[in-house]
Amino acid sequence: MATNNESSRNPHIVLRILRASELGWFASVRRQGREQARQRGLNFNSEVMEAVFPPQLLERDSIEVLSHQYQGGGLDERPIRKQQKNWRLVGDCVDGPGLENVSEGDFFWARFSSGPTGRYEMLWGVVTKTDTPDIHAAISHKLAPELSSGMAAWESHRDQAVFLIELIGLEDFRTGTQSFRPRARIIRTLGRELIANEIIALQELIKNAYDADARNVRITFVAPLTPGAGSIIIEDDGNGMTLETLQNAWMEPATTYKVENQRSRLNRRVTGEKGIGRFASARIGRKLSLISVSRENRKVVSAYFDWGIFDDESRFLDEIRCEWTEKTASPNASLGTKLVLNELNDDWEKDDGASLDRLNSALSRLLSPLEQPDNFRIEIRTPPNLSRHQGEIRPPAILGRPHYWLTGDVSSSGEIDALYLGPDNDLRELLESGIKPKISIAGHTPRCGPFSFEFRVWDRGKDDLSDDATALGSSVRDIRRDLDSASGISIYRDKFRILLPDTDWLGLDLRRVNNPTLRISNNQIIGVVSISRNENPSLLDQSSRQGIIDTPEFEDFQTSIKEIISKLETQRAMTRQSATKERADSPKGIFGKLEIDPLRSFIKAKYPNDVALMKALDDADNQIKQGVSEVKKVVARYQRLATLGQLVDGILHDGRTPLSAIANTVRFARRDMSKFEGDTLDAQLRKRLSVIEDQSQRLFDLFRRIEPFSGRKRGRPRAIALEEIISKTIELTSERMKNLGVSVQIPSSSTTVTVDESELQMIFFNLIDNSLHWLEKVPPGKRQLIINIERTERGLNVIVSDSGPGVPEEIRNHIFDAYFSTRQDGIGLGLALAGELAEEYDGGLMLLESGPLDGATFQVSLNKRVGEIQ
């Protein structure tokens, strides 16, 4: 045993035999359920501690060591704590390579060394009988006599230590620590990577001016605006910077200055917290001169940065020094900051200043186009050849003349408090059945937090915009161009816009493709959604400054906005229907307007003796009816295919289980054939075949349920129990119902009807699908669906009732209109086509005032071709 030398810093090698009680320290052992630890950690006896550590450390209750696993683990802080008779290396269970097969009797070794700061480092590992039997045997043979007390320690130059070092392979193994030392080019690299383009870079610098309480920002472009030449000067009248702010905030990448100072002197909520905005200047030009006059001490601070020097790959960031000066400002010096960016990186004159066009558009949306914050003004000055781009940044005049307008707030509980204004100038509160609507996502309130919104929508037809063009002294073409430049929904955090990679980030154009009559496109709407860092802490910017990090909270945010837009689309649809058409008294469905009976009556009364005209009219009527019949078949086919698309997820889920069971059974059968023989094999194969037969039947049943939606040519109506059709339709949505926790009640009777099964299944599927969608809006535990069958003098009524939010009174007269839908992504054909199919049976589809449950209740009447009802 080596004796302690107080001044010695020689490494020591420690070796010990692992006991059963200590195996639980290894995570792999605990996972395998082998030995459970009675203590947490490894014991070190006093003799070993005295050999390794100097006396002054042993006077403490705990010695911190920097632990490093030899086989490839990371650095780990661990204490060796004093016990009553010994010391213990404690901490969480260890895991990593080489620790999978630790057992009692294996060896734990550690090399202790003192670093340059006096801190002790421990390199350690294990030698197991399973993984390294030869090394384990050599240690047992050579060093076992040294381990009479279970462990021992030797200085690294001792024979025992040399033997162990050579055996394990520690001769050339070194450890240490190293801090990051970035190359100077990281400044330009981050500028290019984090700031996507010159437009975003300028916006970042303008946001810095806003954070400094500036009321006015002027951007001056000095020709020639070509790469390697010209200048851009950004001046503001804000608070300015002191030398301390320049050194400890502006020149400190990833500074926490704005995290710690989230409000400005004017109580503005600062717009940046990541501390990377200053890289924007390196993105714009090669050189920067900064001049700032501070409101705090009225001193002028100047600094010069040659970003080109930072491209030198041979230099480290801390090797480059930047010049600065400080002096007292003259009495008439203006407060604020001036940035002069020289030797530009981009061509601002290209394509007649197309970049300046994009800059104007971006800056007009940098601040809310519907509300200018705190009188913050931005002005652009350009050379004479680009003068059309200069002036104060203002939103287009057409923004003050929306055709439809919705503004309001969403509370943290999802309640919408909003006002709607349409072309009739009737300002009214947005209500559903007399109460404020509430957003519910899968039964829970939106997790994104409260926010406010304002949406302005225009109909873009020539006739729709002609009055606006006249009032503004403009043209329809110019108005459309202005709407294009400002269109889309923008998110503003604390009054400043969050840049998004796509203006149509909600997919409005795709929604409109499916339902162009009801949905609005992205170029029809200009919207502002306002959030804040305090109220919406989970909506975080991406580092690229182009978008919000995709989180469940952001998904709820998107869903909430689309639901609000859907409510605006509903109001717009009702307004347009009232203005453009008179509703028919009798519900003839979506094909009713193709009848020419009124025209026939008019012509017969006016030209009663014109036989040729009446014959031509009859021929036209027959052609129209044949065409309508063909269209009905096509529409029905596509509706079946659309419904089949909705069923794909369920089909995949339901079909995967029996297919997996069949595949596994075949694999087991092959194993049985090599393992058994005679009667035993026969019994095993019969058992396997029975499983395959059962699972195959599950697949056949699944295919049978979805066959009515396959689009094949329909067969003749056949006698079938109406309850069976309902049950099959329920089966198609069973997985969805299970996930939602829907309680379903269906009739247990047996009512035989003669029908086309697929047509009735189509009707019921649309009604059930609608019910399930709206049942997601109510909390779990309150989701119910009841289907009843009633006999009437004329036939049958099928009642479908749910416990959802119900149908608001104000839209009850519209829900059967083609392309009208209050679902976010609804097409608006489900109920219309279901009604058409019901009419084929001399019946109909109607919404009842009340039913068994408090939500929506629909009645399907079947009065014709249902055969003998039994």
Image: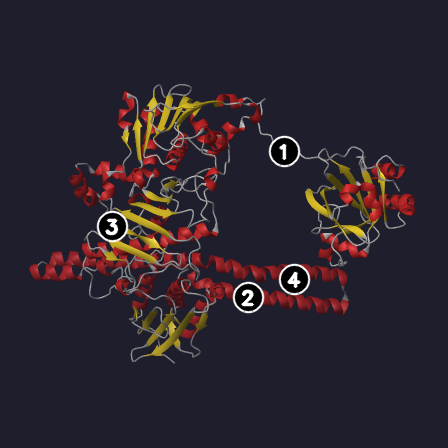
Residue identifier under label 1: 179
Q: Is residue 608 visible?
A: no
Return the x and y of residue 108 as percentages of the image width and height: 80, 47
Which residue is tagged 3?
404
341 is higher (above) or lower (below) than 675: above
User: Mark 4 — residue?
Assistant: 665
Mark sitting earlier along the chain (1/4)? 1
Q: Residue at x 71, y 52 (%)?
A: 93
Distance (Cα) linking label 2 and label 3: 53 Å
Would you say 133 lies left or right of 744 here?
right
The answer to whether residue 681 of the structure is visible from this angle is yes
What crowding class fits label 1: few (fewer than 14 Cα within 10 Å), some (14-19), or many (20 or more)? few
| Of the two numbered discs 1 and 2 in the rendering, the one whose residue sits closer to the viewer | 1
Residue depth check, mark 1 versus mark 4: number of the one nearer the observer:
1
Q: Position of residue 860 (x, y in %)?
A: 33, 71
User: Label 2 neighbourhood size at 10 Å, few (<14), some (14-19), many (20+)?
Assistant: some
Number of residues whose C-alpha sits closer than 10 Å to that of mark 3, classed few (under 14), some (14–19) or many (20 or more):
many
Q: Amino acid at mark 4?
A: Thr
